[in-house]
Image (cartoon, coloured by chain):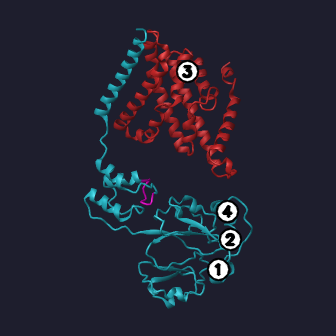
Chain colours: A cyan, B red
Amino acid sequence: MEILIPVLICLGIAAICAIILTITSHFFSVKTDEKEAAIRDCLAGANCGACGYSGCDGYAKALADGSCTKTNLCTPGGDAVSKQVSEILGVEAEEVEKVVAYISCNGNCNAVKSRYEYIGYKSCRIANMNYSGDKMCTYACLGHGDCAKVCPQGAISVESGVAVVDPEKCIGCGLCVKTCPKGMVKLINADAKFRVACSNRDKGIITKKVCSNGCIGCGLCKKNGPAEAITLDNNLAVIDQTKCEGCGKCAMACPVKCIR
Amino acid sequence: MYKELILILMGGVLVNNYVLQQFLGICPFLGVSKKFDQASGMGIAVTFVMLLATAATYPIYTLVLEPMGLGYLQTIVFILVIATLVQFVEIMLKRFIPALFQALGVYLPLITTNCAVLGVTLNNITDGYSFLQSIISSLGVGIGFWLAMVLFAGVRSKISATAPTKAFQGLPVTLIAASIVAMSFYGFAGIVENLLA
């Protein structure tokens, strides 16, 4: 009998707690938007932030309450997710432009000269603090793989001192773009046929001194290729992917073969 | 009277710091201390819940458990009451003060069965405090928790910029740093007793 009283008291307190919680959750709970939960379920769930919101939850909330009308911002999900989201919201689907990260540098160990021997911690961010890194070209990929570390898909590898993106694995989240201390990782259309593998904006004669693969801004690509697709921006060739037709004349003309 | 309350408050903040001296609430201390904002938010949320938990459990102990000679049930009953209380507060905040919920909401479920919260309510009973003293004590402990979180968030931001040996990366170096911070708090031992003397 002695054990009965404590058991009953415990049960009584538990019952009171349960009743209080049931009543409060019934009367005071906030109705969550069904739409929001449904949208959240069909998003890719990588929480990568490519849409520009804090994460998948943030994007779902913005879509559900109408503050964002674009259904095609989820690059990892691609067209399939855009379609599902549009169905839930009852609007027409917009196509997702599939983008992949591209490291616009080909200054590998053979091409670019070394300024000093860097023996510090293997991090581009830290190496960049020491006189913009050990490579003579201050625009070059430092090759310590900070981008590879943040890549959620493991799509980036470092080959002979330069990071390389595997376009098959890349989901276009842009985390590497934000991480690179040189700011030379770019998101470009996945269908792009030719890209400029250099970010050096110095004059040709200076570029030539530091790297044998660097764009010298000679403009031969512009002269030989379709002029409207290529521009020279501060001694660096830039290809407008919307106008590029993939004829390949620019790549043939390039004397340093940095268009590929 | 006031002197005694101040002593209890300062004792909770510095001398008997729950995280650094009594090793309660280590889980959020290591888990949520990566960024200053989060650490501060967690500290405030814990302080808030500690105050509420003490206000709820003290009457239950003195009015229900003690008269019936069931003091030994305090741990199990307190867990029950605190868990309910946190859920209740979470629902209420979400409904009536959404701004505060935005700030504290994500931390509340983590605190539901936090041992520091349970510890402060149990210790208040053990120390024989009155109701007012209990409230002041849990306020002090909460501030102490917040202080430890914020201090350690600063330490961790420094650690993140360094490159320890591979074997020490991550949790090991964090624990070593935590022990050094804890050691620094031993310097406060004996200060509070003589604070107002």
Residue B87 vertical placement versus B192 (above, below): below
Q: Do the residues at pointers 2 and 4 share their chain?
A: yes
Q: Position of residue B18 (x, y in %)?
A: 59, 29
Q: How many marks?
A: 4
* Separation of marks 3 and 1 at Cα, in angstroms: 71 Å
Q: Is residue B42 shown above or below B3?
A: below
**3D distance between C-alphas at marks 3 and 2:** 61 Å
A36 left or right of A216?
Answer: left
Please state which of residues B136 and A23 is positioned toward the viewer in this rendering.
A23
Answer yes or no: do the residues labelled 3 and 4 have beta carbons within 8 Å? no
Q: Secondary structure at mark 4?
A: helix
Tell me if residue B17 is in the magenta stretch. no
The local secondary structure at tag 3 comes to helix
Q: Quadrant of residue A210?
A: bottom right
Say which amino acid is labelled 2: Lys
Main secondary-structure element of the magenta-colored stretch: loop
The residue to which callout 3 is attached is: B123
SS type, badge 1: helix
How far is the residue under mark 1 from the one under mark 2? 12 Å
- CA distance for labels 2 and 4: 10 Å
- Picture coordinates of residue A23 (x, y %)? 30, 29
- How dense is the environment of label 1, judged by Cα within 10 Å: few (below 14), some, or many (20 and up)? many
Earlier residue among tags 1 and 2:
2
Residue B174, percent from left and from top: 64, 43
CA separation in Å, label 1 and label 4: 21 Å
Farthest residue in the bottom direction?
A: A224
Residue A32, label in figure? none
For the magenta stretch, what is the residue range? A49-55
- What residue would you read off at disc 1? A207
Residue at 59% x, 21% y is B8
Q: Which residue is mark 2?
A: A135
